[in-house]
Image: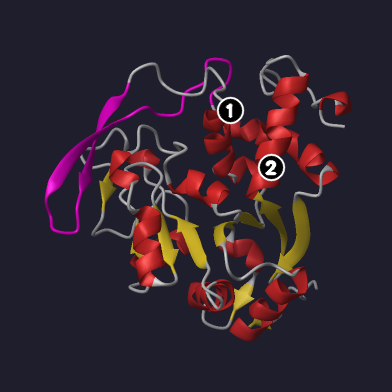
Amino acid sequence: MIGKSDRIFTQEDIVAQLSAMGLPRDTVVLAHSSLRLVGRLEAGAKTLLDAMITYFTAEGGLFCVPTHTWANLSQDITLDMNSPETCLGAFSDFAAADPRGIRSENPTHSMAVFGDRRRALAFIGDEHKITSGTAPESCYGKIYQAGGYILLIGVSHARNTYLHCVEEMLGMENRLSAEPRDVTVRLASGEVVTRRVRTHHTDFTNDVSLRFPKYETAFRYHGAITDGYIGNAPTQACDARVMKDVMEMILKNGGGADPLVDERTIPPALYR
């Protein structure tokens, strides 16, 4: 359902689009988004967030919005739990400030989680123990465990942070800094604590996530992606478990060779 450029979308419109995609309402869904590409909304970011919460938490599910602060690594405070500022744009900033959500204490890759409060607290409960921003024991790994989805609203797989977690699950080399670094978190109480985490680092490119779109053809071949629209934005709903299985297949069939080491497309023989 493609909306006209001058159309104003309501909460009900967005819920109807989600329903048309047939997405589950009882699992964990993380949404990366471009609010600009969604188009005009009746109440701006609030309309989009209200629709997502209404739809994805109706049957016990959790809805998550990334509220990353990795861009603050060179600053005194990497994550300030009392500040809604993120490095991901307007929708993430809005979600971080919304009192209905609970924000994780992941110092570089936090997320705001909406839904049943007890379940949300359990979901983010291990974030102070993580060894990297997208470690398998983090919320990103728990999306896989829950059989959840990654929603890409008007953005490509270059924004699919979950794939960093999959790479860690698969033990892919040349993805993290050799040594952990100290990062600081200002808790909601005002106390400042220090965490030690390994950050994303790859020798052969400045940002390996820019090569994540290479996986899309393989994901589609194995039915990992459901297409639709949110507002005017083309949207992919991506099955977390299938994406991990496909990446594992490519790595295994390639004899362990890194499929992202260059910009060439992934040979179909590796995933068919």
68 in relation to 202, above or below: below
Which residue type carries mark 1? Leu
Percent position of residue 241, x then y: 65, 46
116 in relation to 252, above or below: below
- Residue 243 got which mark? 2
Which residue type carries mark 2? Met
Locate residue 118: give its quadrant: bottom left
Q: What residue do we see at 28% from left, 25% from top?
A: 181
Is-magenta flag for residue 195?
A: yes
Locate residue 85: give its quadrant: bottom left
- Residue 70 got which mark? none
Q: Nearer the viewer, residue 234 or 191?
A: 191
- Residue 163 as seen in the image, left or right of residue 249: left
Q: How is the image coloured?
A: secondary structure
Q: Mark 2 vs mark 1: which is more N-terminal?
A: 1
From the image, which quarter does the C terminus lie in? top right
Q: Which residues are magenta?
A: 180-206
Q: What residue do we see at 69% from left, 42% from top?
A: 243
**Neighbourhood count class around disc 1 (C-alpha, 10 Å): few under 14, some 14–19, many 20 upward:** some
Q: Would residue 106 be visible to someone looking at this image?
A: no
- Residue 170 got which mark? 1
- Residue 54 as seen in the image, left or right of residue 253: left
